[in-house]
Amino acid sequence: MPELRSSAYDSTATQLTAGVAVETDKKGEAEQPVMRTALTSNGAGLFRVCWGRYRGRVICTFNYSDINHQSVVLVTASEGDEANSTASPQRFIGSADFTVTSIAPFDGGVRFAVQIIGWDEPIPFWSDIVIMDGFPPGFIRA
C-alpha cells in the first residue's frame, strides 16, 4: 500500500506525492492528501485520492511499487467535497473544468498533469487512478 506524504517545492509549481505529490503554479492550502483504495492481489487496482485544494496546472505523482514503465494506467479527475469524513466522497461537475494529460508511468509510480480551468480560487479535486493487470504486447510505431 502506498505511503501518503505531501511535499511542495519549486516556486512555479507544487508537487504532491502519494505516495502523493503535487506541482502547481498556483498552490492552494497545504494539506495531507486522502486516499481510498481497492486492490487486487495481482497488483491491479483502483486508488481514489483527494489531492486537496489547488488551482491552475497541477502535476501529481503517485508512487506505487506495482507500477512500472510498461504499466497501463488510467486517470480521471473531478471536483468534489472535502475529504473531511470517512463517508464516500461526493464528486460533481462544478463551474471549473478539469483535464488530465501526460499520464506517464515509471518504475515505482505514475505522474500526470491536471489542469483546473476557469476558477480563480483553490478548489478540492479528486482523482481515480486505475492500474490495469498486464502489459501491452508491444508497440506500434506510426
Image (cartoon, helix red, strand yellow):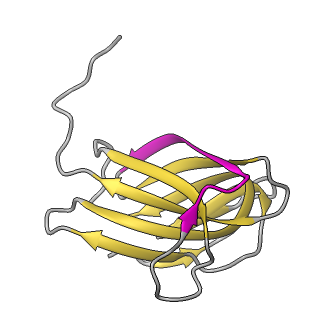
**Residue 35 in picture, x, y percent from top left:** 46, 75
Image quadrant where one finds the N terminus: bottom left
The answer to whether 45 is drawn above or below residue 7 in the figure is above
Q: Is residue 83 visible?
A: yes
Residue 120 location, quadrant = bottom right
Membership of 33 in magenta stretch: no
> For this view, does 120 lie left or right of residue 102?
right
Give the residues in magenta. 91-106
Q: Residue furthest bottom?
A: 85
Name the one closer to the observer, 55 or 24: 55
> For this view, does 122 lie left or right of residue 16?
right
Residue 83 location, quadrant = bottom right
Residue name at image x 49 percent, y 68 percent: 49
**Residue 41 in picture, x, y percent from top left:** 14, 69
Membership of 93 in magenta stretch: yes
**Residue 142 in picture, x, y percent from top left:** 35, 10
Residue name at image x 38 percent, y 66 percent: 47
Q: Residue furthest top?
A: 142
Q: Looking at the magenta stretch, what is its main secondary structure?
A: strand
